Image (spheres, coloured by chain):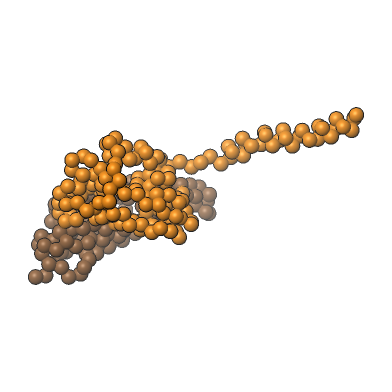
Amino acid sequence: MQRRSFLKGLGAIPVALGVGSLPILAKEKPKLKSKNAMPFKKALEIVTNGKGAKQSAKVKLIVPEIAENGAVVPVKVNVDEPIENVKSIHILTTKNSNARCADVFLSPRNGKAYFATRIKLGGTQEVVAVAVLKNGSAIMAKKPVKVTIGGCG
Amino acid sequence: MAKRKSIIKIKPRKYKVGDIVKVDFIVIHPMETGMRKDKKTGKIKPMHYINEVKFYFNDELFTTILPWETVSTNPYFSINMKVTGPGVIKVAYKDNLGEVNEKSKKVKPKG
C-alpha cells in the first residue's frame, strides 16, 4: 500500500509542474506591438470613410505570387479611370501589424493613375490596392503573396 | 542633420511636351519598424521612417505620398507625370524624427 501511494504521488508532480509552468512561459515573451499598429478592417474603414470598397477589374495590381524575401516585395498599381476621377490610391496588407503601407494623393498633372513601390511583408498574406474616386466611392483589387522569409518585425 | 542620398529618374530618357513620363524617386533610408532588436546590445531599435513625400513641378504641388514603416528599406516610389514644358521637379521629404530634405531635377523636353 505504501509503495502504491508513493508512485501515485510521483505521477502527480510533473502534472502540477506542467500546468504551473505554462503561463510563466507565455509571460516571458510578450508580443511586440508597433506604435502604429492597426488591423486591416479598421484601416480599410478609415481609407474608404466607412463605406467599404467594391472589387473591380479596373484596378490592376501587380505583385509576385511567391516572394522569396519578405523585406522587399515590389507592388505596382494601375487604375483604368481618367485621372480627373481618381483622388487617391492606398496600399494595404491583411496581416502586417500595421496594415497601411502607403497613401498616394494624385492630381490631374499625373496624367495616369499609376503608383509603384516596394513593401515589407511579415508573412504569407494578401496585398490590397484601394482607389478612392472623386464621387467618394472606392474600388479595390486583392492578390495573395506567398512569403518564404518574413521581413516585417 | 545628416544629409541623405537620393535620386530622381525620369523614364524614358527622351520625351516631348505632352508626353506622360515616369518619375522614380529613391532615398537611402533605414526605415526602421521599431520591432527589430539590435544584435549587439539586445535593445529594440527605435522607429525611424519617412512619413511624407511631396512632388512639385515648378513649385506646384502635384502628388503627396504618405508612407508608413511597412515600406522597404531604401524606399522607392514611382508615379506618372505629364510634361507641359521645361521646368524643375522638386521632391521634399520628411521623416518621423523631424528630418527634412529635398532634391530637384531639371525637365528638358525635346521637340
The residue that appears at 10% across and 60% down in the rendered structure is B84
Q: From what the image shows, is residue A67 above or below residue B47?
A: below
Q: From what the image shows, is residue A72 above or below residue A93?
A: below
Residue A105 image offset from top left, x and y in percent: 22, 47
**How many numbered marks have been drawn onto this rendered protein structure?**
0
The residue that appears at 48% across and 56% down in the rendered structure is A149
Q: Which chain is orange?
A: A
Specify the quadrant that holds the C terminus of chain B: bottom left
**Left or right: where does residue A65 sit relative to residue B54?**
right
The residue that appears at 23% across and 60% down in the rendered structure is B23
Q: Which chain is brown?
A: B
Q: From what the image shows, is residue A124 above or below residue A28?
A: below
Residue A50 image offset from top left, x and y in percent: 29, 35
**The image quarter in which residue A5 lies:** top right
Q: From what the image shows, is residue A53 above or below residue A3?
A: below
Residue A72 seen from this side: no
Residue B12 image offset from top left, x and y in percent: 21, 68
Residue B28 seen from this side: yes
**Left or right: where does residue B96 sit relative to residue B105?**
right
Residue B29 image offset from top left, x and y in percent: 35, 56
The residue that appears at 19% across and 51% down in the rendered structure is A81
